[in-house]
Amino acid sequence: MKDLNPVITGRKTSIFEVMSRLAIENDAINLGQGFPDTDGPEDVRRVAAEATVEGPNQYPPMMGVPALRQAAADALQRHYGLSYDPGDEILVTAGATEALAAAFSAFLTPGAGGEAVIFEPAYDAYFDMVEGAGGVVKPVPLTAPDWALDEDALDAAIGPETKLIVLNTPVNPVGKVFTQADLEAVAKRALEHDLIVVSDEVYEHMCFDGRRHRSIAALPEMRERTVRMGSAGKTFSLTGWKVGYTAGPPELIGAMARAHQYLTFATPPSLQKAVAYGLNKDTAYFDGLAADMQASRDRLARGLTEAGFGVLPAEGTYFLTADIAPLGFDDDVEFCRRIASEAKVAGVPVSAFYHATNAAPPSNFVRFCFAKQDTVLDAAADRLKSWIDR
Ligand code: PMP
Ligand code: GLN
């Protein structure tokens, strides 16, 4: 048999798979993989159920059902004052994951350069997907404890081969929300060097303490070079649905759509109709989601602080970053293995969110997902406290 492509054989099992498997084997509370433990709004689920029964359930339009493209455009106008034409500026995909895959395969050219600047720590899928598309990852570290943007490091990462910058705000795994100044710094480089911005905004409706999400697409001249991605999984606490929507100028969306037609071609029509219904919900729904998540963040932060962890600020997302140094630990991977098997709580080592070329990622941080019921968060904090005090 021929050798398999080394990129493919070199692929590791993702940290989420590893930790979720450990959680199941050990009957641990899973604060590792990021998903809510209660399903999103019943009315949205009912629309999906009815649409499935009524049909049609055949291939919907490749770009997405018109109702969802219209609802996504309306939502962007309503939340951020951004105008997109649902005809050729919105693409529906199988989650934001497929949108990212389509973007990287559309914008990076194997064998002809194609570097992607990625702020790290980053959602680990970016690294693998960029490299799978034949691109080269240029990591730019965000600096703890506030995950500040280092403009010199950003400048150093950009060169003649750079095609795009991946921006994720709010940031998985560390919950940073990019400030207006951060966004301006990124936009300045994109404009100076003629770069595309792949803007992953899946946690857009989870910004805390009065912060509002801002899209880089709203900055002057940035709409024309940005593809901005949202996810129904996050916005409606339905991560298993895998319905994503990307907005951008026709040329970029068209290039992504040509990749999408050979990735999945389409996403279940009934789910698309239900997400369209959901996106049309009034502002109270979106504000309520942020308020609920903020309360969960505070609850887990209290529990972890009482257990002895250092807890870093989380401005958005599903995730808290806990510092294990005050507990006397300095190896996040080993720590996560031990708490999964001994304390019966799973988390994710933050070092897993750095590119392989980073020789010394911080090793004292653990990501915990707080998108869980109060009783689950309390039980996890109790278990960790008992294990630490043992
Ligand atoms: N981007 C980020 C930053 C994520 O955390 C995730 C994971 N859930 C995704 C994209 C993928 O979203 P989806 O489930 O819609 O594919
Ligand atoms: N985005 C989720 C997380 O960061 C994981 C999604 C996945 O497992 N593919 O935990």
Image (spheres, rainbow, N blue to C red):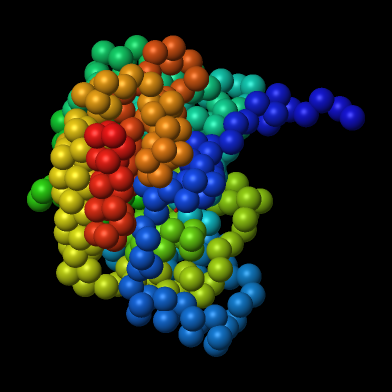
Farthest residue to the left: give it. 210
User: In this orientation, which residue lies closer to the viewer: 139 or 151?
Assistant: 139
Q: Position of residue 349 (x, y in %)?
A: 39, 31
Q: What residue occupies the far bottom of the structure in this picture? A: 54
Q: Is residue 358 visible?
A: yes
Residue 178 can be seen in this image: no
Note whether 145 is above or below 230 in the view shown.
above
Please give left or right for residue 207 compared with residue 9 in the image.
left
Quadrant in the rendering for residue 265: bottom right
Name the spot of residue 10 as percent of width and height, x first.
Answer: 65, 26
Image quarter where the C terminus lies is top left
Give residue 75's position: percent from left, percent from top. 28, 63
Task: Count the labels in the image.
Answer: 0
| Residue 110 located left or right of residue 293 | right
Q: Is residue 371 above or below residue 366?
A: below
User: Can you give x and y, in whole percent of width and height, for residue 177 in the image?
Assistant: 22, 39
Q: Residue at x 33, y 19 (%)?
A: 330
> Residue 306's quadrant in the figure?
top left
> What residue sits 56% from the left and 86% below the top?
53
